[in-house]
Amino acid sequence: MSEENDDNSIAIEENDDTENGDFVVQDTSSSDEVKNGDIPNASRFVSQREIISIIFSKKTLYHVIVLFSLLLFFGIISYTKSDLASSLILIFGYGSSLGYFVTAALNRFEIVKNLSRSKSFTSLILPLSLSLVFSSFFWAAINNQIYGANMERFLTWGYIFIFVIWQFAQAWWMRVPFKEIALRKMASSKDSSPTNLGIVLNIFSPILWTAIGGLCFYVVSINLSSFKDNFNLIFILFWIFLMAMMGSITFYLLKNLHKEFLKDSKIAAFSGYFALGYWGFLSYHAGVFLYSMYNDPSFLYDLVFMIITIMLVIYSLSVNVLRGEARRAHLSPTNHYIGKATGLMSRHNVIFYSISFTIAYGASNFFLATADTSLIGGIKGVSRIAHMIVLVSGILVLLIVNYNLLTGRGLISEGFVESIRSPKHN
């Protein structure tokens, strides 16, 4: 994760092929150069394997183990569907999330930073102690005879709010791997005559994932008897209509956004390959949304993306913090110095903020799979709303990523809403 300079120092180097304000993560060999604000010109990409090795370094490994152990515990007890399981997820979900949040805030003090980021098991003393203290407060509040029921209802609504908000976040974080691939394809693309690659891939992507989704539905219908009767011609037509509607709206807005630049070789490569990957994510949520219209929503399907989202949040928050710190270090000896970072997050506490957020998100998933949510219309209602939010957010993210690329390269200067409107001469 965010290592100190004597471990895996990370610097950020501006690249012409990045989108507006985004940078490419680079690995430097000398910690002193970063410390002095000198970013070496010869640097290389940090591979995904190296990013994982940073996250699971000795200074952060124990905290990551705690995160996944806690989520595993929530997952196991959620199968009981009992009131006790719901209460435990409420108590320890909120308690552990607050425990790591306060640990992150206290990392501004040197003694806390050294203790919580040591390479031994003692690094868990502070966050686990705080988690137990907060959990005891929630246990006492829930079991209070006077206001216990109201407190439990309030905490339940809190998990619902967290679950829904995270659907926006999921769409945003999932752009990261596909954007990196698209940027590399863009960098390898040579300037040449206009190409239709961007148009073809943006049209072909939803069609391809519609076909793949249909095949997945067929496989599920063979292996799941409760879904077999629902997988008929009407279901298939609804699936095609849903994907066609999303694809048509997205391409229309994207075409308005790019205008003639969609045929530029580099722009076409980025837009096309990003769409090819990102539509896989959108089709997954469209498929689960349609599936939940006929069957009880399967949190097993959502569990896969929950784990992926958690890893992406840890990765993305770390990169953003390291990028800001390295950029300030790079500009410190110049006239463009933008001052010392004053935000809440730093390379020393970002792992604790990430764990705090992801514990709350994971707990909300397992709670909704366990508890009696009749007061909000049941699990089906929550699941459908959540996936609808992901789909709308995903289309918006796809457009924003392309918009940032165009503005970052100075090709357009209009505001986002103005840029996706129909041309005035139409």
Image: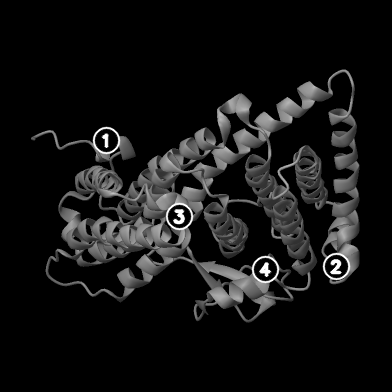
Q: Position of residue 5 (x, y in %)?
A: 71, 72
Quick check: 124 above or below 103?
Answer: below
Circle nearer the viewer, 4 or 1: 4
Q: CA distance from mark 4 to mark 3?
A: 41 Å
Q: Which residue is mark 1?
A: 418
Between 156 and 235, the one nearer to me in the picture: 235
Amino acid under disc 1: Glu
Q: Which residue is mark 4?
A: 55
Q: CA distance from mark 4 to mark 2?
A: 14 Å
Left or right of 352? Residue 115 is right
As helix, strand or loop, the secondary structure at mark 3 comes to helix
Residue at 85%, 60% in the rendered image = 116
Quick check: 417 above or below 77?
Answer: above
Q: Which residue is mark 3?
A: 225
Q: Are marks 4 and 3 in contact (CB under 8 Å)?
A: no
State the mark number for residue 69: none
- For marks 1 and 2, the one nearer the N-term is 2
